[in-house]
Amino acid sequence: MMCSGRVDMSFVFRAFANGNDGVFVGTCHLGDCHYITHGNYNALNMVMLSKKILAHLGLNPERIKLEHVSAGEGLRFAEAMNEFSQTMRKLGLLGQSEGIGQDALKLKLQTVIDLIPYIRVVQNERLNVRFDTVEEYEEFYASKEFEKIFNELIADKLTIGQIISLMREKPLATGEMAAILGLTSSEISRQINNSAMQGLIKYEESQKRFVIA
């Protein structure tokens, strides 16, 4: 047994990348830390942020579940696992039930994995919140304050990362990228314009496609 605070976000998204349809994280109850490190608060923050990232990728956030259950609650643990198994059966295969092709799914998950060191910095500097109850965490992660931080510092980075990964394979037009990533052409155009201003990509007139600069 290890402290749930050591469950890194990279473990979660590598599990998805390796073909798992869901991830279950069990922690001590809040305020009742077995190791007196309060790592369960860190785990709750990590899971809540991971849910937001899954939703941004077009994947069902219910594919990751955190349950507060102590080592002495064997029956509750069994119930929680059965409930999660039932949820996974209803959700079906990762990506397939969300209408995301395997190539696009692989690209999306790898983009997250590559960005996790950066996401950790954002989490530590801007999202390192501490509350007493799960309800307060849920309220924060549903707030406009969080959405603003997420959209500005994480969501855009994830989208740009996916776009650049696609263009490493071949030049692409805006519509082609939108179709692969399941995004609108206007969102792709916005990110392309921002990336072009930073000198990351450029438009190749001869091919009528965008390429890495």
Image: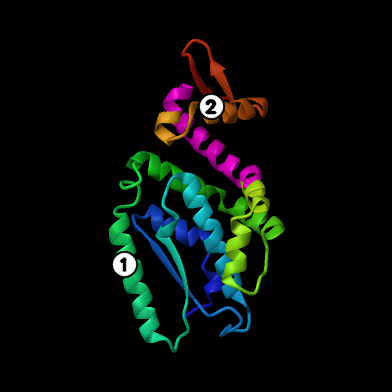
Q: In this orientation, does residue 171 appear?
A: no
Which residue is at the far right? 125
Left/right placement of residue 83 relative to residue 42 reads left
Indicate the position of residue 175 as horizontal and vertical percent values. Answer: 44, 23
Residue at 58% x, 68% y: name it. Answer: 135
Give the labeled residue for mark 2.
186
Instruction: Place residue 44 in its image quadrant.
Output: bottom right
> Farthest residue toward the bottom?
72
User: Which one is nearer the viewer's eye here, 187 or 5?
Assistant: 187
Q: How many marks?
A: 2
| x and y, in percent, of residue 121 in the image | 66, 55
Predominant secondary structure in magenta? helix
Q: Quadrant of the C terminus?
A: top right
Q: Is residue 137 magenta?
A: no
How far across and down, in percent of the image, does residue 181 sit? Answer: 43, 35
Determine whether 207 is above or below 56 in the image: above
Q: Which residues are magenta?
A: 151-177
Q: Position of residue 31 (x, y in %)?
A: 61, 81
**Residue at the spot x=56%, y=48% of the render?**
115
What secondary structure is found at the residue carrying circle 1? helix
Residue tagged 1: 85
Q: Is residue 162 magenta?
A: yes
Which residue corresponds to the image point at 39% horizontal and 80% vertical from the top-left? 77
99 versus 212 height, above or below = below
Q: Residue at x 60, y 65 (%)?
A: 137
Q: Amino acid at mark 1?
A: Ser
For label 1, the crowd category at 10 Å Cα-Cα, with few meaning under 14, some 14 to 19 and many 20 or more, is some
Cα distance, mark 1 to mark 2?
A: 38 Å
